Image: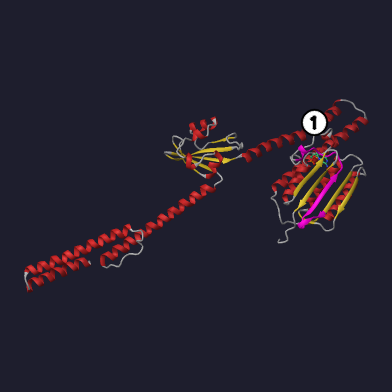
Amino acid sequence: MSRAFIFLILLTLSTLLIGVTTSLIISLFVCISILGLWVIYQSFQQERFLSWLKNSSYKTSPNCYGVWKLIYSSANSLLKKEDLQESKLRNNLLALRRVAEVMEDGILIIDNNNYILAINPRAERYLNIRQEQDSGSNILNHIRNPSFVEYLLRGSLNKTIIIEDLSLDKKALEFKLLPFDASQKIILCRDVTKLRKLEVEKKDFVASASHELKTPLTVIKGYLETVSEIEINEVEKNRMLAEMLLQTKRMDALINDLLLLSKLEKSYPIKNNHQTNISLLMSELSKLSANVDKNQHSINFNVEDNVFVSGAEDNLRSAFWNLINNAIIYTQKGGKIEASCLKSEGGKAVFAVSDNGPGIEAHHIDKLTERFYRVDSAGSWESKGTGLGLSIVNEIVKKYGASLKIESQPNIGSKFSIIFPPINTDV
Ligand code: ADP
C-alpha cells in the first residue's frame, strides 16, 4: 500500500473524528488546509526535481523521503547510465578520429554531388586540400586531372585508379571510391610511389637479367651452329671450345650472383648476429688475391689483429672479395692495391680497398650499386664482371647495419670502404 494512500485514509479518518467531536466546518477547514499543504509540498518537490534535472550536478540528489526519494534514485541511475553511454560514444568517436588521423591512407568523404564533407590529415597532405577552408567545396575544383574527373563522374565504386602527376612532388596516388551510405561516398587515397618504382625496377631487372644471359648464350649458340655446319680444324675448334667455356662460366657467375642477391634481399637486416674475426679472413683473402693476381699488381694487406665485426663469415668474405677482385680487374698492370682492416673510433671497424687504377667519374658513383650498372669504358663488357658485384656488396653491408663509402677520382684511383658499426655486446 502506497504512503500517499495511507496518508489519504488517515486524513479522512482524522477529518471524520474532528467532524464528530467538534463541528463539520472545522473538520472541513482542517482537511482543506492539510490538502493544501500537501499540494504545496508536492509542487515544491516537482519544482525542485525539475531544477535538479536541469542542473548538471544531478549526481547528488537532495534529502527527501517517500516516493520522491524513489523518483530521485531512479532518475539518478537512469541519468548515470545515459552519461556513461554518452562518454563511451564520445571516446569511441575520439578513437575513430585518431585512427583516421594516423592512418596511412587518405580518407575523404564526399556527398553525391561531390562536395567535400570531411577529410583526414593524410588526404589533406596528399591532395593539398584543407578541412577547415575547403569542406563544402566541390572535390572536382581541387582535382582537375581528366582521368580522376572521369573516374569520379563515372562513379566507379570499388575500382581503383592510379594517378602519377597530381602533385608537384610527382607522387603516384591510388584512389578507390567506396559507397558509404545513400547520400555519401568515401574516397580512399594512398601513396603508391614506392610500389610503382619497385614495379618498374622489377621489370628493368628482368629485362637486364634476360639480356645478360642472352648475350653469352647467343655466342655459344653461334659456335655450336658453326661446329655442326662446317668442317673446322682442330686449332679453330679448340679456340671455339675455349670461348664457349668462357661464356658458360660467365653465365654461371651471373646466375650465382643473381641467386646470392635474391637470398640477401629475402633476409632481414640483422643486428646482433654471429661475430667474425675479419683479421683472420683477411689472411685467407691475401692468399687468394696472390693466386688470382699472379703478380700483375703490387698488392699490400694492412691488417690490425683481432678486428671483430657482426656478420656471417661467408657474406663478409663475398663482400670483401668483390671489392678486392674489382681492384685487381680494373687496375692496370703494375698498379698498386691496398686492402686494409682496422679498428676505428667508437668501436667501429673499417675494411677498405684502394687502388691507383683508372678511377670513376663522379656522376657514376651513386649508380654503382644498382643492378647491372657498369661504367661504360671500352671493352668492359667483354672481359669483366657481371655488373652485380657492388649491388651484392651493398646488400651485405645493409644487412649488417654497415655502410659503403665510395671515393674515386678519374686517373688517380678509387677507394671502397665498408664501415661497420660497433659490436653490440648486450646480446
Ligand atoms: P662488375 O661485376 O662489372 O665489376 P660491379 O658492380 O662490381 O660490377 O662494379 C660496377 C662497375 O664499377 C664496374 O663495371 C666498373 O666499371 C666499376 N668499378 C668497380 N670497381 C672499380 C675499381 N676498383 N676501379 C674502377 N672501376 C671500378
Crowd tier of the residue under label 1, counting other residues whose Cα lies within 10 Å: few below 14, some 14–19, many 20 or above: few
346 within the magenta span: yes
In the rendered image, residue 129 lying in the magenta stretch gets the answer no
| Residue shown at 24% from the left, 62% from the top | 44
- Lateral position of residue 335 relative to residue 5, left or right: right
Q: Is residue 382 toward the left or the right of residue 78 in the image?
A: right
- Of the pair 146 and 272, the residue shown nearer to us: 146
Is residue 1 in view? no
The quadrant where residue 53 appears: bottom left
- Residue 128 in percent (x, y) is at 54, 39
Q: Which residue is mark 1?
A: 218
Q: Amino acid at mark 1?
A: Thr
In the figure, residue 111 lies in which quadrant? top left
Return the x and y of residue 256 as percentages of the image width and height.
Answer: 78, 43
For the magenta stretch, what is the residue range? Answer: 342-365
How many numbered callouts?
1
Q: Is residue 11 visible?
A: yes
Percent of width and height locating residue 146: 54, 30
- Residue farthest along the bottom direction in this orientation: 21
